[in-house]
Image (cartoon, coloured by chain):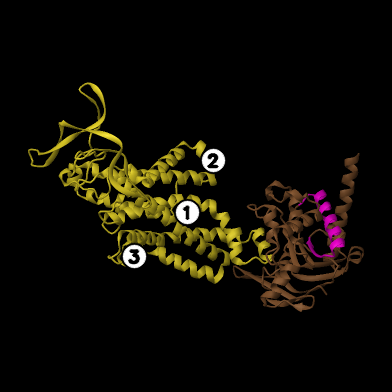
Chain colours: A yellow, B brown
Amino acid sequence: MRNLFNTNRWAMISLWVLGLLYAAALFADILAPYSIRDEARDYSYCPPSAVHVMYGGKFAGPFVYGTRLTFNEYHARIYIEDRGVRYPVRFWIKAEPYRFLGILSSDRHVFGVEAPGRVYLFGADSRGRDVFSRIIHGGRVSLTIGLLGVIISFTIGLLVGGAAGYFGGRVDQVLMRVCEMVMMVPGFYLLLALRAAVPDTFNSMQVYCSIVVILSFIGWAGLARIIRGMCLSLREREYVLAARTMGLSHAMIIRRHILPHTVSYSLAAAMLSIPGYILSESALSLIGLGIQDPYASWGNMLSEAMNIVRIQFAPWILTPAFFIFLTVMCFNILGDALRDALDPTTETAITPEAMPVVEDSSRGGVAA
Amino acid sequence: MLLKLENISKTFTAHGSTIKAVNGVSLSLAVGESLALVGGSGCGKTTLARIIMGLEKPDTGSILLNGRPLGRDQKEQRDFCRKVRMVFQDPFASLDPRYTVRHILAEALCLEPRRTRVEEERLMKQVLSQVLLAQDILRRYPHEFSGGERQRIAIARALMTAPLLIILDEAVSSLDVLVQQEILALLAALSQKNGVTYLFISHNLRAAQMLCSKIAVMQDGRLVECEPTARIMAAPGHEYTKALVSAALTYRVRDKEQDEHNIL
């Protein structure tokens, strides 16, 4: 495994990128100069602020100029730099207080500018909220939803597939028909239907959890089918027969001698199915059924970008799309590398039959 | 009688055709009187072993251990599991590659009353010394051993519960000739020392002859002959047995010629 990452440069890069993204999401409170609710209506669709270091031909440390709102000849709002006002970028600055991970109270941020100046690395959205801060905070939702969803659906998939494959016969018949029923319904519509069943009185945390559960509910069936196939052959291995003759219980045999042998495959499949969850969440949030404003997720930030005029006017509101793209690609490269390392005989990308969970990504992708 | 099989039959159905794998087989084994079950490939030997171990359900017939029929009672089945053990053909497949020898041996004790770690370790070491393996291999994995050593581990696993009967399903067939001899000698010694009885399933009459006092010959799912070893080898009654015995003899002659050739 270590060998794989040393030889495959892209996999290595992907791992680093994902590491950075997850670290950024974890330390979002500290890293982001503003909170997700920090609005500045005067700065609606303010473009990314240019960070300068030279002033009057001399090095002056990083600073941003103030901005002034005017209107152009079409009466559209434009912002121009007010060269008269300078706001130095300060590090470890005292700003809005927060509780880091709900435990540590602090008001320090890695960087920021003194009020009333504002620094927008990736520009501002319609309400003047910092896109950079919201992307980092939104990563918490978008990045964890894939992991949590995969953990839950793979637990279900492994158990159901393991039981169906190991016991065979009627158990297999029943469980596989259930799987097929779940797989039969087009994923996105099932997603919408299940989402509709969630009460709209839920707060954001409850909505988040319900989305995870819904995504897992859709994702487990494909894996269960593959695991079942593997178990059908594993259960005839002599060490499984030996365990049976020694009187081990079925649960113990499945846990000790069957499922561990599917782990390497499952791991690669899990990697490849995470993008599906991320995209599904984005799609759901995009159409307003996922995470609700003011809470940020990459999907609901994109819902502002559904209007072509706005994109023309403020293209930076598309930045979350770039992060979704980056994350999905990294997971795919990583999953591919992992799969290649485990099974050197296959070379092509994912086959839809072998990796049905990945289908979600295309569904989500289309909707997104 | 240690083990008694009465009128065991098993039919497999595949793609519309039926195969009588085992057809009305009755057998009995006395304590200390190891029995060899000999026959060609596909004659139903292994199916019979699997039926005894409960891996297959027989269509008809019953299995008696110490005169008591094996019922559906769970306690009885557990008792059967502890007293009757099986060693499989392929030592490369019968040990789970993910676990250490300690884990593999400990698993054999799953039906036993709980032991302390020290007791467990003492038992493992004692069993390992019985199969002539070093006692410090407990932390190692199956892939670190040769075929013969693995089969010894498999035998050690079978011995963990001090069984009355061990079913050896082609247990030496996949090993090379010298290792076969070693394992057979080991099995013979164990039988003398521990009083364990074998049901030795093989297609190799010579190996059967070394280990067992009685030989049963199977053909096409039926038991065609069951006699003391000496009589089978000297005066085989059934046509099929005659063929088997003469094949084994010519094989032996050829072996000797080969040896002489090698010496020259």
Q: Residues within 10 Å of mark 2 (few under 14, many from 20)?
A: few
**Residue behind mark 3:** A194
Position of B85 with respect to A273 (left or right) is right
Percent position of residue B98, x then y: 63, 52
Graded by Cα atoms within 10 Å as few (under 14), some (14 to 19) or many (20 or more), the crowding at tag 3 reads some
Quick check: A287 left or right of B228?
left
Q: Mark 1 or mark 3, which has the lower sequence index?
A: 3
Label whose residue precedes the other's in the sequence (3 or 2): 2
Q: Can residue A361 be seen from the camera position used here?
A: no
Marks 1 and 2, how far apart at CA: 25 Å
Report if the CB atoms under discs 1 and 3 are less than 8 Å apart. no
Between circles 1 and 2, the one closer to the viewer is 2
In the picture shown, does residue A299 fall above or below A9?
below
Image quadrant in which the N terminus of chain A is located: top right
Q: Which residue is mark 2?
A: A2
In the visual, does B62 lie left or right of A25?
right
- Tell me whether circle 3 and circle 2 mark residues in contact (CB < 8 Å): no
Q: Amino acid at mark 1?
A: Ala
- Per the image, label 2 sits on a secondary structure element best described as helix
Residue type at numbered disc 2: Arg
Q: Dot 1: what SS? A: loop
Q: Identify residue for label 1.
A: A354
Q: Chain of mark 1?
A: A
> What stretch of residues is rendered in magenta?
B175-202
Q: Residue at x 78, y 51 (%)?
A: B133
